[in-house]
Image (cartoon, rainbow, N blue to C red):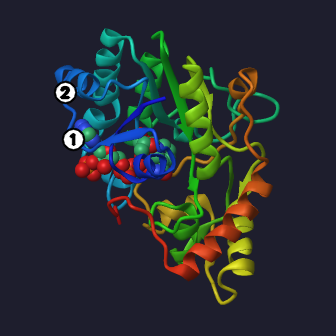
Amino acid sequence: MKILIIGGGYIGHRCHDAWADSVISTDRVISKEDVLKLIDEHKPDAILNAAGVRGKPNVDWCETHQLETILGNTKLPITIAEGCQERGIYFLHIGSGCIFYGDSPHPDKKWREDDMGNPTEVTYSRTKWATDLVLSTLPNVGIARIRMPIDYVPSPNNMIDKLATFSKVIDVENSVTIIDDMIDVFYKLMEQKAVGIFHVTNPGTLKHREIVALYEDLVDPNHNNEWITNDDLVQQGLATKTRSNNFLASENLSKIGIEMREVHEAMRDTMEKYAVAKKKGEKSNETLSC
Ligand SMILES: NC(=O)c1ccc[n+]([C@@H]2O[C@H](COP(=O)([O-])OP(=O)(O)OC[C@H]3O[C@@H](n4cnc5c(N)ncnc54)[C@H](OP(=O)(O)O)[C@@H]3O)[C@@H](O)[C@H]2O)c1
């Protein structure tokens, strides 16, 4: 299967490094003609959209750069979809679980794939939700929502590195995505040309405290941080807008026979590999965004 990855950032490079049969495009994609040119040049079986705007140094940037965020997270995926529909190419778009804030209305508090997003204030979340809302009406399109990527490869985009370097960390619990599992799931979704929305998060939930405890156990016993609440983040001026914390139910992957490892098992394995990679001085290939 030949996969064309659009977007040469963190996720794009992690996928490209893992898939021998992929090509990655870092060209600027603005119009449908740009997409058709890439398709005609590479003749892919599937396209993964790993391009987007997350904000630099963090998502608060999007609050003052709304148009860039809309163009990157909403217009660009629709433009890629236009080209893919015209050439009959399967399109997998990377969505975000950050379209959900707080607990779902379901008794188990978890958000389902077909629940409506509830991003009221945050520009990044609104642009991601707008895209899911419209792309999910199309045939031959899959949306893979990920959350808080956790990776064995050290990187400023890796949740482990973020938690290890912040002096104040919010004491929250979330659904998360282990990158090794995500890479495997994305590949399978493209093999199956799976249509619809998929929560690509590992079963179970993880507290930031559990990640930090594992980090201190396996990587740096001298690590130290202060614990604060989610509300403190904005009240103390550490963030402009509140962050999304939530639990996601992943129901659609199992319907098509795709499983991910339980989150604690996957987290321990990842932290063990991370400790080795850190000692060797390994780091990811992506352009650093912090
Ligand atoms: N990493 C996370 O925490 C996370 C969590 C949930 C969802 N996601 C989603 O995953 C996707 C990939 O994220 P990432 O972490 O890999 O972000 P990233 O490291 O910022 O990479 C995104 C890449 O897209 C490129 N890009 C932006 N506009 C483009 C355009 N018009 N044409 C071509 N390339 C363009 C950017 O290039 P420039 O930098 O040169 O503009 C950048 O290289 C995004 O959709 C993001 O919303 C990420």
Residue 29 falls in which quadrant of the image? top left
**Residue 163 makes an appearance in the image:** yes
Q: Is mark 1 on a helix, strand or loop?
A: loop
Q: Which residue is drawn at 48% across and 9% down?
A: 139
- The spot of residue 243 in percent (x, y) is 52, 51
Q: Which mark is residue 27?
A: 1
36 vs 167, nearest the viewer: 36
Asked whether mark 2 lies closer than 8 Å to ligand 1, one says yes
Decide if residue 211 is on the left or right side of residue 186: right
**Horizontal relation, residue 266 to residue 63: left or right:** right
Q: Looking at the picture, how far across and down is residue 144, in whole percent?
A: 54, 32
Q: Which amino acid, mark 1?
A: Asp
All told, the count of numbered labels is 2
**Which residue carries the number 2 mark?**
34
Of the two numbered discs 1 and 2 on the same chain, state the one appearing first in sequence: 1
Determine contact: label 1, label 2, CB under 8 Å: yes
* Label 1 CB less than 8 angstroms from ligand 1: yes
Residue 231, image quadrant: bottom right
Q: Which of 245 and 176 is in front in this view?
A: 176
Q: Where is residue 57 in the image (x, y as percent from the top left)?
A: 34, 62
